[in-house]
Amino acid sequence: MTEAAPLSLPLLPTAPAPLKAKDFRTDQQVRWCPGCGDYAVLAAVQGFMPELGIARENFVFVSGIGCSSRFPYYMNTYGMHSIHGRAPAIATGLSVTRPDLSVWVVTGDGDALSIGGNHLVHALRRNVNLKILLFNNRIYGLTKGQYSPTSETGKITKSTPLGSLEAPMNPLSLALGAEASFVARTIDSDRAHLTSVLRAAAAHRGTALVEIYQNCNIFNDGAFDLLKDPATSDRAVVRLTHGSPVRFADQGLFRGPGGEVYADTVTPANEARILVHDAHAASPVTAFALSRLADAGTLRHTPIGVLRDVERPVYDTELAAQLERSVGERGGGDLATLLLGNDTWSVA
């Protein structure tokens, strides 16, 4: 594979002194339900931030509406609790105008994929320099337990008492279809894995989408028990490592005749055909097949890790270069000239 040339992004101001996790904690009381998976994600993010060596005032967390969207209150950085579904749009404006900032979006499956679906898709296709953490608990928690865009078919909730008739959205498939340059999945309770994925997302230039399976113990408790219970997780969780054959328990992943990916028992006869994960493949075909591997209802054979991590032109950099060229061609940033241009008329 031919490596693309590194994309140029400005270096962010470094912290004047080494930071610790406590430096990223605010004095606000954390107001999530006891046992909520959001606590684990918050602790992982606060513990991971010092690794980046960036000054706290150069971080911004932008959220929408939902339980997860209280996140900015608990991060001792700049932040904005914005409006329903619009966090990617607001964060885009911030990122392209302030390249000295590390901009993070915190959203939920309802916020991002329902009213905010359009904004999410366009942030991904533009490849804005954002890190998007999508908390997926497969339910509306803040509004007390209605089905969400990721709830499985047949889900009985307050708004679907006879069971949901809708097919659930697959956030990773959606992201890959939008040409996202970084797509990953992790689990709230797996601190080591969550941190490793956050680390990879932070290092990525462009939009990085990280889906985090997050338990809502009040309205959808146990939704991901298959992936967390030691008795079942070895055969249910498919861990992806770039450059390594994809194996779990006595199983491996193989490519089918139609390009699909499937799991099967590893034998001496098929061991040489085990799929080797390539997160940097230019084509998203295999990553998309991986995103479709798990059944939405049972979560059997759920890939976690980085599905795709490729280089694409970064919107922020391209926009800045375009503006610089435009100013050079016009001989300066004259607002009147820009507004009037050549195609104007005077009406008597």
Image: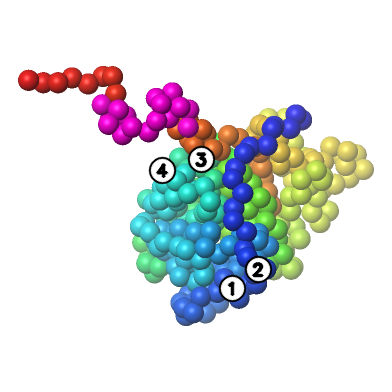
In-front residue for pair 34/225: 34
- The circle on residue 118 is 4
Cα distance in 3D space between marks 2 and 4: 40 Å
Report the residue at 40% width, 63% height from top: 81
Considering the whole magenta stretch, tell me its main secondary structure. helix
Q: Element type at marker 4? A: helix
Earlier residue among tags 4 and 1: 1
**Amino acid at the residue labelled 2:** Ala
Cα distance in 3D space between marks 4 and 3: 19 Å
- Horizontal side of 124 relative to 311 (left or right) equals left
| Pointer 3 residue | 316
**Amino acid at the residue labelled 1:** Asp
Pointer 3 with pointer 2, Cβ within 8 A: no
Report the residue at 66% width, 42% height from top: 308
Does residue 309 show up magenta in the picture?
Answer: no
- The circle on residue 23 is 1
| Residue 177 in sight from this viewpoint | no
In the rendered image, the vertical position of residue 290 relative to residue 195, given as above or below? above
